[in-house]
Image (spheres, rainbow, N blue to C red):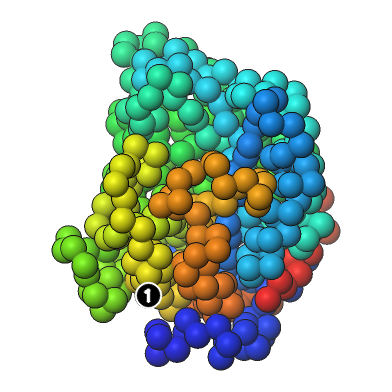
Amino acid sequence: MRAVRFVWTALSLLSQLFAPQVTERVGALPLGAEGFREAGLGAVRGITVGPIESTVHPGVGYGTDAGRAAIAEAKAMGATWVALTPFGRVWDLKGGGVDLTFEAPVESNTENLLRAIEDAHAEGLRVMIVPHLWVETGGWRALIDPGDEEGWERWAASYERFLLHWADVAERGHAEMLSVGVELRSWVTTRRAASFQRIVKRSRAHFSGLLTYSGNWDDIANTTILGDVDVIGVNAFFPLTDKESASRELLLEGGRSVAAQLRALAAEWQKPVLLTEMGYTNRRDPALRPWEWPDGMTNVHLDEQAQADAYRGLLAPLADEPWCAGFFVWRTYADPGDVSQEAEWGYSPRGKLSELVLRDAFAAPWAADGGGDRYRALVAHRARTPGVHAWELSPARSSR
């Protein structure tokens, strides 16, 4: 059954029956792990389109013809959502503060992001905004540690300024979802989490859409702020095996194990789970240690089939789970003609065998596609009720 699910030619017509026809932009989900399904939003079939924020390379990136081509290409693959990732710069892991200027002035990056949101909506795609942190001197943002209490207070104030800027931009552009953070382990899994919770709550005064947090796959179960977001986000670079040259069946077994972990998380918090990032690199055994960053690799053995098999191993078991709100693939870039953004063995599925698996997954019906009639009526009622905030979605036309 799962094998059949991923045969695009057999399912492309079926997928039209499941295409979401939502016209409301809702500010809250029904309670429970199947809230996304009940809201009638349809499972997320998403691609992260990475920015090219550089004054050295004008005419590419968000809000340009090249960026529009990348968004149009995402739709052509079958995506119904795109994730856009504006960056802020942190000098080092001491967390001295976030500089909103990244590669180009924040003012131009802001206008470019607004144009990119508009471009996505013009294609009938929904949008998640994911403000990201870049550590200039190297190191993983999850290990940021300002040290003492005063340092953490300064860091929290700086991060709040960064997040609320992009929350305001997301609201101006009528984006549908905002990730309030990405892999902030040293903050959200510790006693420091209370200050992050306050920022999340303040963000709701700036952004009226759905909130998620993009937690890393190996610490999401210890993240304490999941009660403050609408959707549990997971950067899902799960290993699917501990063996080299694992068979497809072993990879599917690994995917079923991941589904069981996430099912328990959804049940514990009674919230849907969204893969805010997922992907595997184009190399031998990518499902063994999928978090290993490709930039520093040498003597890499390219293996498109292994990448495609890893995609299938993770996604196939999740498609049958009604608590799974869907996924975002990591990633393509805002200039389809620029192949310099990552090595050939990087994560992008574009033009590789994994793109075919991705198209299959986009075309397939997902369990989270069901439901919605009752909730759409509830949203319409709320929109007519004084004092209740409701907002509109741009129509999500089927791209399949």
Q: Amino acid at mark 1?
A: Pro
Tell whether 21 sits left or right of 74: right
Outermost residue, left side: 243
Secondary structure of the residue carrying tag 1 is helix
Q: Would you say residue 62 is visible in this rendering?
A: yes
Outermost residue, top side: 150
- Identify the residue shown where x is 70% and y is 21%: 105
Determine which quarter of the picture holds residue 126.
bottom right
Tell whether 175 sits left or right of 143: right
The residue lying toward the viewer, choosing from 119 and 353, is: 353
The residue lying toward the viewer, choosing from 231 and 18, is: 18
**Quadrant occupied by the N terminus:** bottom left
Q: Would you say residue 198 is visible in this rendering?
A: no
- Identify the residue shown where x is 39% and y is 8%: 150
Q: Give the answer, above or below, for where 192 lies relative to 75.
A: above
> Quick one: label 1, few (<14), some, or many (20+) residues within 10 Å?
some
Residue where numbered disc 1 is placed? 317
* Image spot of residue 59 (x, y percent): 76, 36
Tell whether 142 sits left or right of 288: right
Determine which quarter of the picture holds residue 255.
bottom left
Counting the numbered discs, the total is: 1
* Image spot of residue 40 (x, y percent): 64, 71
* Image spot of residue 169 (x, y percent): 72, 35
- Identify the residue shown where x is 36% and y is 58%: 302
- Identify the residue shown where x is 82% and y is 57%: 122
**Quadrant occupied by the C terminus:** bottom right
Q: Give the answer, above or below, for where 218 lies relative to 350.
A: above
Tell whether 308 sits left or right of 332: left
* Image spot of residue 335 (x, y percent): 67, 47
Determine which quarter of the picture holds residue 186.
top left
Q: Give the answer, above or below, for where 388 lies relative to 165.
A: below
